[in-house]
Amino acid sequence: MKTNRILWLLTSLFVLASLVLSACGTPTPAVEQPQQPQQPAEQPQQPAPQVPANLPPAGPELTEAYAGKFKGTVVTMAGPFVDNDAVKFEQSVAAFEQATGIDIQYSGSKEFEASIRIAIEGGNAPDIVDFPQPGLLANFVKEGRVIDLNTVINPDWLKQNYSQAWLEMGTMQGPNGPITAGIWARANGKSLVWYPKKAFDEAGYKIPETWDELMALTEQIAADGDTPWCVGIESGAATGWPMTDWIEETMLRTTSLENYDRWVRGELKFDSPEVRKAIKYVTDIWFNDKYVYGGRSAIATTSFGDAPKPMFENPPKCWLHKQGNFITTFFPEGLEAGVDYDFFYLPPIDPAYGKPVLGAGDIYAMFNDRPEVRAVIQFFSTGASLEAWVKAGGAIAPHRDASLDWYQDPVSRKVAEVLQNATAFRFDGSDLMPGEVGAGSFWKSMTSYVSGAIDLDTALKEIDASWPR
């Protein structure tokens, strides 16, 4: 009874309070209605992923990727691209990421060689690794850490889209035999001789097709009272590397590919008739003061980037400069490719060895096997993976399905043609040799030889002695 009385009293007070509030003009709250689920704003419908009609037959995972099967997955990648190169790489894969929904997370490092070794040996290898030096990749292949891409990418497609020379360089020895260790992406050609085209044409000089014609042109320029060659090998701690490039070029033109490969592996000594012969072709030019701007004594102190600049003085102070396609970034501003400068292929010496090309490039290897990783590495085997970079400048594609129309100037287009049409291609020898040699004694002893500090016998013995046993 007491409880009922209390409830009645509370109810009366509540009613009285409501009447007072109403009289004061305060609105009574509306009865709360159950909330209706809010309808989302109408979004434009996203088109379903479309498989490109001309998708290359690189592998089934690539087709599945474009059908959206791997949307939301992540593929990690590591390599040496930093700064502007890293930006261009990201731009080159952006369309693929958007079309497939796969996120390619790239990590670049200036200390790549050291950092990637720690990651791989520590069991934390990225899914895909970009190696600028195939010699380092070969070490991991020997240890059995690398996935054979012959089991990942359609072998017929690889044969169709890469020349035999590129395929051979991507084949490395694993614990159980040779494997396809990687596929090649960005490439650089080094077998190029640059010249000031406008002045060259006005002088009536002709492009040499053979080494004898090259030497005849050299002598003709000297006879005209000018200096034929621009040469410089200074490069800070890396001083000497342009000399090693020249020796590698003449090795490819005076002996067999087998001997070149034996030399790179340390099986053919520097102090051998083959290497001595190759060096003489270089020094016949370099050590003739009539042939080199500043003479022999200036070579070791002239920066490799500054060496070609006298070509563009009026009149030219020198006329010929052998260097890779990257050297155009060191040319004076305002020059037009194909008008102010051009290049020709460094001619063969012995016709028996064809028209070899020395170069460098990036080889992509796979360390973790998942469907989305397969899709990405298959994508990298296509020219489309490099299209945006080629169009932006700074990359040459080794893929046969890469269109020459992508190149923004006739000179870059010609470099691509040289690489695609090479009868043989070999990687920069010093980059393949052990670091103690390729980036050590080979550079240093050749610099001392060029500067006259030591003779050739001493230089060759120093290099051979430095080879790790």
Image: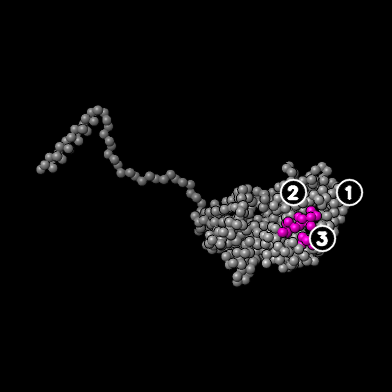
Q: Residues within 10 Å of mark 3 (few under 14, many from 20)?
A: some
Q: Which residue is mark 3?
A: 280
Q: Helix, strand, or loop for circle 1? A: loop
Say whether residue 448 is magenta.
Answer: yes
Q: Are marks 2 and 3 in contact (CB under 8 Å)?
A: no
Q: At 23% from the left edge and 28% from the top edge, which residue is drawn? A: 23
Q: Is residue 357 left or right of residue 128?
A: right
Q: Image point 65% across, 64% down: which residue?
A: 170
Percent across and percent down for residue 407 are 69, 51
Residue annotated with mark 2:
303
Give the number of the mark in front: 1 or 2.
2
Q: CA distance from mark 2 to mark 3?
A: 23 Å
Q: Is residue 321 above or below residue 430?
A: above
Q: Residue at x 72, y 47 (%)?
A: 330
User: Which sits in the foreground, 133 or 331?
Assistant: 133
Earlier sequence position, callout 1 versus callout 2:
1
Find residue 224 and name its label.
Answer: 1
Outermost residue on the right side: it is 223
Quadrant where the C terminus sits is bottom right
- Give the magenta part as a residue range: 441-460
